[in-house]
Amino acid sequence: MMSLDADGGSAPMQVGAVLMFGMEGGQDPVPLFDRLAQRLSAVPRLRQRLVNVPFGCGRPIWANDSRKQC
């Protein structure tokens, strides 16, 4: 709730992450990507997105994102 409240106004509060992988030495990245996909699917929140509800029905809710399947 605090994050959503602080996200309004002229200075939105956003949190993100970036993973950078170096492939020096000619390593094949496919096994790494496969392993990451397996691990990420174990975290339900990473398969969800924030959805607005109809006006007057409360705050936004987390819902499973049917567009992205790991």
Image (cartoon, helix red, strand yellow):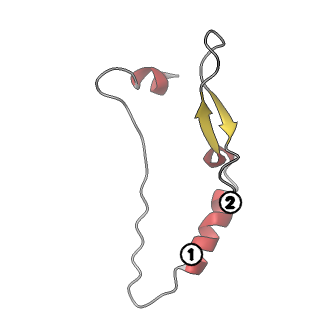
Left/right of residue 60 with respect to residue 10 in the rendered view: right
Q: Residue at x 60, y 39 (%)?
A: 49
Choose between 27 and 60: the one closer to the eye: 60
- Is 62 located above or below residue 30 in the figure? above
Looking at the picture, does residue 4 appear above or below residue 50?
A: above
23 or 55, which lies in front?
55
Which is more foreground, mark 2 or mark 1? 2
Label 2: state its secondary structure. Answer: loop
The amino acid sitting under disc 1 is Leu
The 10 Å Cα crowd at callout 2, few under 14, some 14 to 19, many 20 or more, is few
At 65% from the left and 53% from the top, the residue drawn is 68
What residue is pinned by disc 1? 32
| Residue 11 relative to residue 35: left or right | left
- The residue furthest top is 56
Q: Secondary structure at mark 1?
A: helix
Image location of residue 24, percent across then percent down? 38, 85
Quadrant position of residue 12: top left
The residue that mark 2 highlights is 70
- Please state the horizontal and vertical placement of residue 1, each as a whole percent of the image: 53, 22
Residue 17 at x, y = what percent? 43, 52
